[in-house]
Amino acid sequence: MKLDWRPFNLPLIAPFRISKGIFHERRAIVVKLQYDGQQGLGEATEITYYGKSIEAMLRALENIGKQINDWEFVHPKLFYERLSSESKVDPFILSALDCAAYDLYGKLHHQNTREILEIQHDQLGPPTSITIGLGSEEEMVGSMIERPWPAYKVKLGQPDDIELMKALRRHTDSVLRVDANGGWSINECLEKIYALENLNVELIEQPMAPEQDGHLAKIKSMVNTPLVADESCQGPGDVQYCQASYHGINIKLMKCGGITPAIQMISEARALGLQVMLGCMTESSIGISAAAQLISLVDFVDLDGAMMLKSDIANGVTFQDGHIKYFDLPGHGCDLKEQFQF
């Protein structure tokens, strides 16, 4: 087996603001696993507020590549087990490699990833939301009007949150979800949740910082709107912990380490009575196509990462009126555009 990779800059359509900063582009790494004449692709994106830098990920790939190039490839689960047991691999890089392994296996055996995972896809599944970043009322309403969509996820975390949401609700009957990215204080959290319930908000993601989860456990019992953990739920070891403070968890492949642990987290969440959101970072269609294979297993979908890019480096799954459209292709059904091949 051979491992190769290439970094890319992914400029955004417009500046994207959340409570953790303003972003104009993302830097990403696409990894390529090659075996027996086929190749599988995966992706890892630099997220500075998670402490993930391109430079560190490139160093990690240099080290891992020396091991992987001597391995035989049998099955993605065996590949994941060996990789995670023999090396302390960062979850973002582990995710890219795990996703690439599923993509490669599908191409070798002429199956899509859903078939490999034995996932039944006989319905549309929940629609993906698209994200509206923090901004002025004019900017946020304008972003929504520019793209009519069945579900929006609205980034909040500033003093006029409720006024902004009222303005958005006046302009749409679509589903509204809220993501505070941990930006609310203890004192304002319950008040804002009650106000958002009156605006028919479907869910609220990570209202306070993870270190405030103890306070959120009490608030959970006082509200009707589902509270979904994001920063508080990184990997499989966090699922049971989140049950006390949240109604659901947001699983992102890069956070947890890929498709293999994501499946484990979905199973554990269901056993604990937790709802599941399938989320993403700002990624190309390489990463989004991998995550999209799991849509039939979850309650909420937020896979708009590639839609935020000025120009996608890859072809892959698409969304029509919010719903997934798969192509009859093996693996994840994605590939780099010709000018970005390596």
Image (cartoon, grey):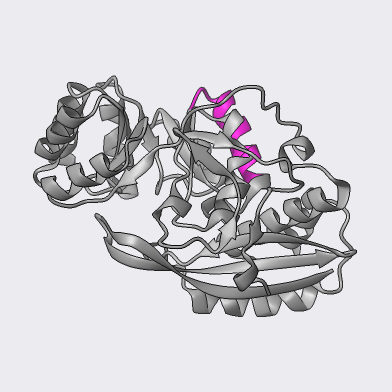
Please indicate, yes or no, whether residue 58 appears anywhere in the rendered image: yes
User: Residue 11 is drawn in which quadrant?
Assistant: bottom left
Residue 259 vs 271, above or below: the answer is below
Residue 267 vs 113, above or below: the answer is above
Q: Position of residue 74 (x, y in %)?
A: 88, 54
The quarter of the image holding the C terminus is bottom right
* Along the line of sight, the residue nearer the viewer: 227 or 15: 15
At a point 38% along the width and 35% down the height, the residue shown is 228
User: Residue 200 is drawn in which quadrant?
Assistant: top left
Instruction: Answer with left or right where residue 306 lies relative to residue 208.
Output: right
* Along the line of sight, the residue nearer the viewer: 60 or 119: 119
Q: Position of residue 163 (x, y in %)?
A: 9, 37
User: Residue 156 is drawn in which quadrant?
Assistant: top left
Please indicate, yes or no, whether residue 268 appears anywhere in the rendered image: no
Residue 325 vs 48, above or below: the answer is above
Q: Position of residue 188 (x, y in %)?
A: 13, 38
Q: Position of residue 213 (x, y in %)?
A: 33, 41
As for residue 193 lying within the magenta part, the answer is: no
Instruction: Answer with left or right where residue 293 lies relative to residue 305.
Output: right
Residue 58 vs 251, above or below: the answer is below
Question: Could you tell me how many numbered marks the image carries?
Answer: 0
At a point 43% along the width and 51% down the height, the residue shown is 307
Instruction: Answer with left or right where residue 110 lies relative to residue 222.
Output: right
At a point 61% along the width and 72% down the height, the residue shown is 339
Question: What's the magenta bit mostly, secondary-structure-wise?
Answer: helix
Span shown in magenta: 261-274
